[in-house]
Structure formats: C-alpha cells, structure tokens
Amino acid sequence: MAYQLYRNTTLGNSLQESLDELIQTQQITPQLALQVLLQFDKAINTALANRVRNRVNFRGSLNTYRFCDNVWTFVLNDVEFREVTDLVKVDKVKIVACDGKSESTQNKVDK
Amino acid sequence: MASSANSNPVPKLYRSVIEDVISEVRELFLDEGVDEQVLLELKTLWENKLLQSKAVEGFHTEEQAALQAAQQQQQQQQQVQQVQQVQQVTQPAQAQQVILPPPPQQAPQQQVIVQDSKILQHMSATGMSAAATAATLALPAGVAPYQQLITSQGQILQVVRAPNGTQYIIQQPQQQILLQQQMQPGGVQAPVIQQVLAPLQGGLPQQTGVIIQPQQIVLASGNKVQGNAQVMQAAGMAQQPGQPTTTAALVQQLQQAQGAAAPQAQPQAQAQAQQQAQPQAQPQPQTQQPPMMLQVDGTGDTSSEEDEDEEEEYDEDDEEEKDKDGGEDGQVEEEPLNSGDDVSDEEDQELFDTENVVVCQYDKIHRSKNKWKFHLKDGIMNLNGRDYVFSKAIGDAEW
C-alpha cells in the first residue's frame, strides 16, 4: 500500500476535488472515489520514484521539528531552494516527510 | 512551450500520472457500471483544475491549447470554459471548426430571413463546414460559426462569433420535420429572427453571451442584446416540444419576455435572480445573538456576545472552525479589547497565502547540537504558488 502522502498536493487535491464534484452529482460512489485515490497513490509514488531525476538543495533556519508515527514535520524559515537551473526563496515552508526506507510498509511495526 | 535546454519536468510528470490513473481506473469504473463518459469528465475536471491553479507551467492539452488561443481573443473566459466542458464531454472526434475570419461587409438585414424550408433541410447533420453553416443559417455577415457542439441532450449547438468579439450559442434543432412545420407559418419565427439578428450588428457590448447548460439557460452580464439573445433561444427552443420541464418552464418565461414590449428588464431580472440565488446560498448564517446576560465584571463591554466569543477563542481547537463563521461577527467588536490576549498562533495560519509545502520521504535526518541535516527524496514542492519535484533533496538548517 503506497503512501497517501501525495494527496495533499496540487495534483492530488485537484483529483480529490474533481471526485467530490462527481460524488455530489452522484455520478460515482464514494467507494469508487476512494479506489481512484488509492490508484492515484500508487501512480504518483511510482512516477516520482522512476520518472524524476533531479536534485535540489536547500538551506534555512529550523523553526520547529516534530517526529511522530515515523513522520517528520519541519517548519523552516527564510529558506532558499537551489536547483541547477534556478533559485527559489520562501519565508516559510513546511516539510512533511514519511519514511523513505520502508516505503511499502505503512502498516508494519518497526522493530 | 519552452524549448530551452532545461525543460520543466513537472507538466510531463503530471500528464503521465493522469494518464496512468485514468487508464488504471477505467476498469474500476466499468466494473461499477459507471459510464466511460464519467471517466472522461473526471479527467477533464482534473486537468481543468490543474490549469486553473496555475501551479504548473505549460500544462495543457492540445485541444485546450487551441481554445486558449481563441479565449484570449474573446473576453468571456468563464463562459467558454463551461462550453469547453460540454464540448469535451462529447465525442472528441467532432471536428473543431476552424475560426473563420468574419467578412468585413454587412449584409442588409432582410436577407437574413430563414423561411425557405429547403435551406432548413441542411441545417441538421454534423460535420457541416463552417461556411456551409453560415450559409444555411443565413447568419448576418460578420457572425461566423466558431464551433459546433453537442450538448448532453444531443442538441447541436452552434457557437457563433460576431465581429466585435461577442459570442452566441444558437441551438440547431435536430428534427427537420419540426422545422418545416413551424417555419411554414413563417410569420412568427422569421420576424423574430429578423429582430433578433438586427441588433447584432451594431454597437454590441463586448461581454454579452449566452450559455446553455443542459437544464438551464444562464445569462451572463449584458445589456439590451441580452433580451434579444434570449429571444433567439426561445425561437430555437420553441421548436422542440419534447424538452424537459425545467427548460420548458424557462421557455415559457422567455416567451413571455418575448411578448413584452421591453423584454430587457425581465431577462436581466431573471439572470440577476439566478446569479443572486447562488451567492445567497453561500454565506453561512451569522451566529445567532445569545440572550442578554447580566455582567458583573465591569462596564464598557459592548454586548454579551463577547462572553461566548471569549470562551471560543481560548479553545484552540474551535478557533479554526468557529472563528471563521462567528468570528467575522464578534471579532470586529472585540479586537480592540482582546486582540492581545491570544496565545495561539492562529494568526500565522490565517496570514498565509500560499503555504509552501514540501511533501516527500526522508532517507536520513541528522542532528548535531542544533545543526540539522536533511536527506530527502521523491518530493513534490509547492513554493510561491508553483509546483516543483525532486528525486533527491539535501538541506541544512539551524534550529
């Protein structure tokens, strides 16, 4: 079972909104919408793992950190994201990171 | 599309994800007995939302690219998008007709009479070229057919573009027989069309248009031509008695408007009523005022609402939800008194416009005293409103 992490992205949210609209007009069932989202999880995880090949560096100051249920959540301030091509600066960014080592073991208990 | 050496990988990635999901989900849809059309609609909605979000650069389909170019020529972007959805729901095999440049000359209005039943026999059928459409519809000069659409009810719509950029949608009835029968009396329909088409050529406002939705006619902003455009719709719609009741009701209304000397007030009222009905549903009812309570702790308070609002504000869980509903009401009065009392960081949450978010997986998180190092992978970032992706990200921060 792939991480549902990517549902809260532009791509994921637009999919969820579209599904909600179809549910509103009763063109699909909520169960079907859930299946679509699960399929989306698989697809996005695979795509990111296989079809993306670029590196980014960033630097900033750490405002808060949290580690709970094997999920790290950081809030950084005054961050610069640097790619080979360009530079992006933001005042505040939230980073949510799931465990990358055992990706397919969302329900497994670590020992 | 940028042809630079460093092309943005995001649109392609998103496109491939969409295609994957849609194709994988097709089976699920069929198993549930859901029509393929719904699947296409899902895809369309999804892509449109991505487009609207402007988070991705250069993200478009081929059809939408052509339409976007056309949209920029016309100022009715909202209407055209709705029309696009209708168009894309229908068979994409329907050829998009090439936009004809409107001929500069203006034909006299009497030539516009559509009375000959033989001409009407050509009016049905898909795949008519735009020129043939213009001829058979006897459109006034300068009004060129732009696109042909089929609504979900199977009606053929002709999207017509006038020289100054306004756009109209004319319904083409599909049944020739009805046309002939109703056009033979001739007297009612033809002058109507005459009247309708007459004002089209002079001094049109630029933001007039008509949208046909499957069950509604929604009128956008407009002036006097609005009434006439409605009349055109009524003329077209009156020829199809088999319409669903809602449409028939609207037709009746439109016909009444047609009969009135000055139909402009009514359609505008209708349109405004329709437009107002929507926003009226939206604003949530304001919080009810609680019964007055005795206060023993000091004067100067404005109302007893404060007691309730104070309790709400101290409860952090409720803040995000209730403050948005009742806060608009109470906070205006309260701010001078209690604005400094809040400990929560609710203000930070309200102030963000685009919360910059990175969603990813971590390989290694390392800390030494207050120096943190992040090794991340497979992430999607939304920074300053735009989307980025990475396969690896390495970062440093001091806490």
Image (cartoon, helix red, strand yellow):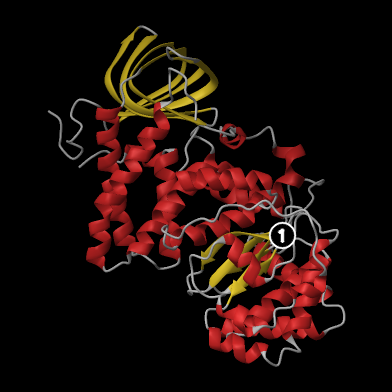
Residue, disc 1: B293
Residue B287, horizontal then vertical, whole percent: 66, 59
As drawn, the residue found furthest toward the left would be A111
Which structural element holds mark 1?
loop
Residue B396, horizontal then vertical, whole percent: 40, 10
Residue B151, horizontal then vertical, whole percent: 51, 69
Tell me if I can see residue B222 in this picture: yes
Give above or below for B51 relative to B25: above
Please name the amino acid that badge 1 sits on: Met
Q: How packed is label 1: few (under 14 Cα within 10 Å), some, or many (20 or more)?
A: few
Residue B206, horizontal then vertical, whole percent: 77, 54
Q: Out of B231 and B121, give the one closest to the viewer.
A: B121
Left/right placement of residue B361 relative to residue B329 reads: left
Give above or below for B322 relative to B218: above
Which residue corresponds to the image point at 53% horizontal and 64% vertical from the top-left? B149
Tell me if I can see residue B268 in this picture: no
Q: Out of B120 and B333, give the one closest to the viewer.
A: B120
Q: Output the chain of dot 1.
A: B
**Quadrant housing residue B268:** bottom right
